[in-house]
Amino acid sequence: MNLSNKMDLFQMRVEYDSAEIELEKEKKLFQVYDLKFKQYIGDSPYELPKIESDKLLLETIKEMKTQVLGSDDLGKSLKIKQAEAAVEISASELENAKAGHLPKLTFDAAYSKYDTDTPTVDAPYDTIKYAMINLNIPIYGGGYVSSKVDSSKLMIKAAGEDLENAKKETHVQYDEYLAIFEASSESVWMYKKALESAELYLQAINQGYDYGLKSIIDLNDAKNKLNEVKYKYVENMYELVNSYIGLLMVTHNFKELNLLDKLVE
């Protein structure tokens, strides 16, 4: 073995050892995630889905595109709905504050029956009935009503600003998720072609190695290239799924979540 091959071999060894370290880390992380997942599903058996780039996958992604592209109905967003509810509550509080100087008429009624076989002084056999009407006429509020009105106006203004911020944040989230989804979905076909090319390349190198035309370094390098393409492909699928879920959350459209089952079946 000449010096050049030795250097290549040592370099490959360093990369192999580094990959072994990363693999052990990932195995430990997998055990942690596996434990967390089993806490949700109990003792039910499960099998990790295999994500493959085939015709069914591409058709499913096309369906996912149909659901999220052009359907930016952000008015259904829970964040916006919550902010709108806060505005309505603040408006109601303002109306109540404005009515603070008006007379108030309240009615209260009660019926109590004490039934015992051994009546005593403390617990007599008695029935109590009463009804009461209260009329409250404010004479002097000392600026209380006006201060409540001013405070309620500030609250409704703040609630309105929160609503506008919620709308802006929701639009930004939608645009970000949509950009990632479009980029990831368009990359699926390219990764499919890259995966096929990497597999053909590995087959060619493997044949050359069998006939002594390629070294073990060339063979391992071809395997490494194939694994890199697979890793990037799975990473791209993760971004696709994550952005799709994000779009469904922003638009509050969870009825199309079942498409993810078709994606990994």
Image (tube, rainbow, N blue to C red):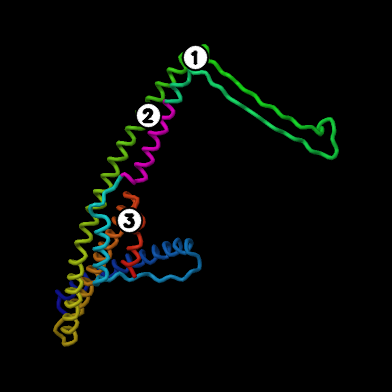
- Region rendered in magenta: 75-94
Residue 87 visible? The answer is: yes
The quarter of the rendered structure image containing the N terminus is bottom left
Residue 169, compared with residue 120, is above or below; it is below
**Which image quarter: residue 200?**
bottom left
Amino acid type indicated by mark 3: Ile
Residue lying at 54% horizontally and 21% vertically, measured from the top left: 104
User: Which residue position holds label 3?
Assistant: 245
- Label annotation for residue 141: 1
State which tag comes first along the sequence, 2 or 1: 1
* Label 2 neighbour load within 10 Å: few <14, some 14-19, many 20+: many
Q: Is residue 80 magenta?
A: yes
User: Which residue position holds label 2?
Assistant: 156
Q: CA distance from mark 1 to mark 3?
A: 54 Å
Q: Point out the frontmost of discs 3 and 2.
A: 2
Q: Point out the frontmost of discs 1 and 3.
A: 1
